[in-house]
Each structure stands twice: as structure tokens, then as C-alpha cells.
Amino acid sequence: MLYMQTGESLLKLENQNTPNYFFKWLIVELAPTIWGEKPATLLSFADSRRFARLTFWRKFGPTFLRQSDVEWAVVRETEDSLTILFYHPDSLAGCLRKNDHCQFLTTFGYKPDCSLCENVDCLKRRYQSGCPHEIGLLLGIPLKDVLGFMGQGQECLSCRGMWCIYGDPTSSLKVMEKIDECKTYAANLMNNGASPRSILLENYSKTA
């Protein structure tokens, strides 16, 4: 069963408290969105003695992402942390427009016929009272698994991996495999000398 790998587990061991390591970590986490396997990626930023993730984001993150196809929005902010949705606009818009997705998301106030910005704002509003279950759909989780987790589906829990899978696991496992492949491929590229920025700007195609 596939469980979520992180930049910290995939990258070569090195000093984490450097901007360059932060860029590498960020690219591994965003790789499935950069290469179109996930419409969006949700990341939390907070500082620790080992890894000043929040400080590096505030100082370098927005500039690093400029001229790329990845956009971002802060969905929750506290005194010492940020939760940020990173998304590929075309992929996320396409996710919102799927017929079965539309029917599900409109019950929570999303409007597929409105701009992507307005729908991201809807997510931000809903996030203020806690992480909303429907965000799973925007993160690439199949609708059947989102509905199952919410107790609204017709399928029983069949297995667990990066998320809980309901019903036939075949399609869900394929999504997990693609996510894992993207992250592993990005980490391998950087472990062998590729720069984080070159991957962000899609100078490397995902061939894993």
C-alpha cells in the first residue's frame, strides 16, 4: 500500500536550514501539481529548530514561484503558521467543471460557472472553521473516496494509503502511484544535480 512520501524522506540528507534545501523540499511536494497529476497541493508552514519552513516561505517563496504555472492562496493563517493551497489554474478549473464534481461542490457554495478566484475564495471562507472535507476533491482524491470518508458514499472502506479508499481500489491506487512517481522523480532529479527552479519551470518532463 502506498503512503505519502515527503520531500524530507526522498531528498539526500543535508542541512535543512538553507534556502536551497527549502526550494528542493517545496518542489518535491509540488511535483504532482507541477506535472498535472494533482489539481492542487495543500501545505502547512511552521518553523522548527531543524527546518525554518515558514521563515523561508515568507522570505523566498513567492519570488521563487514567479513565472511558473503554479499559483497559491493562503487558506489559513495563525501567528506562527500558514496553510497554503498551491494549484495549477487550468487543472483546478477543469476539476471544478466536471459534471459529478459540480453537483457535489455546489452543495458547499462553490459555483463552477464563476471564476476560479471566486471559488478559491469560497474554499478560504470554509477553511476558517476547519479543513473542509471537499478539499480532498481539489487535491486529486477520487470523488467516491471523498464521499466515503464523509459517510455519504455507497461503498465500504476497502483499504488505506495516502487516503482512505472506498469500493474498488484500482483507480484510487493508480492516482496514488502517479503522485508517488512524480515526487520520487523530482527528488531523483535534484539528488543528481538538477536545480529546483528548472523543474518548477518544467524544463524537465515527467517520464517516470
Image (cartoon, helix red, strand yellow):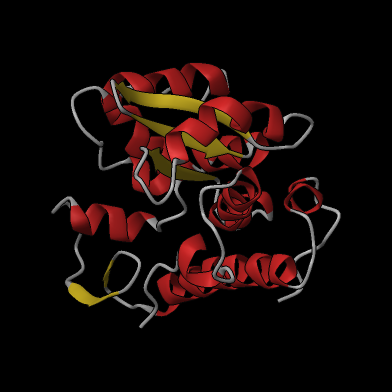
Residue 196 in view (yes/no): yes
Q: Is residue 27 placed above or below 86 in the rendered structure?
A: below
Looking at the image, which residue sits at the far right? 203
Residue 5 point in image, percent of width and height: 44, 68
8 sits left or right of 182 in the view: left
Q: Is residue 29 placed above or below 168 in the rendered structure?
A: above
170 sits left or right of 33 in the view: left
Residue 13 point in image, percent of width and height: 54, 70
Residue 29 point in image, percent of width and height: 53, 54
96 sits left or right of 190 in the view: left
Of residues 97 and 61, which is closer to you in this image?
A: 61
Of residues 176 and 77, which is closer to you in this image?
A: 77
Count how many numbered circles sit on residues in the image: 0
Looking at the image, which residue sits at the far left? 151
Of residues 106 and 79, which is closer to you in this image?
A: 79
The residue sitting at 47% across, 63% down in the picture is: 8
Q: Is residue 202 placed above or below 181 in the rendered structure?
A: above
- Quadrant showing the C terminus: bottom right
The residue sitting at 54% across, 58% down in the picture is: 15
Residue 123 in view (yes/no): no
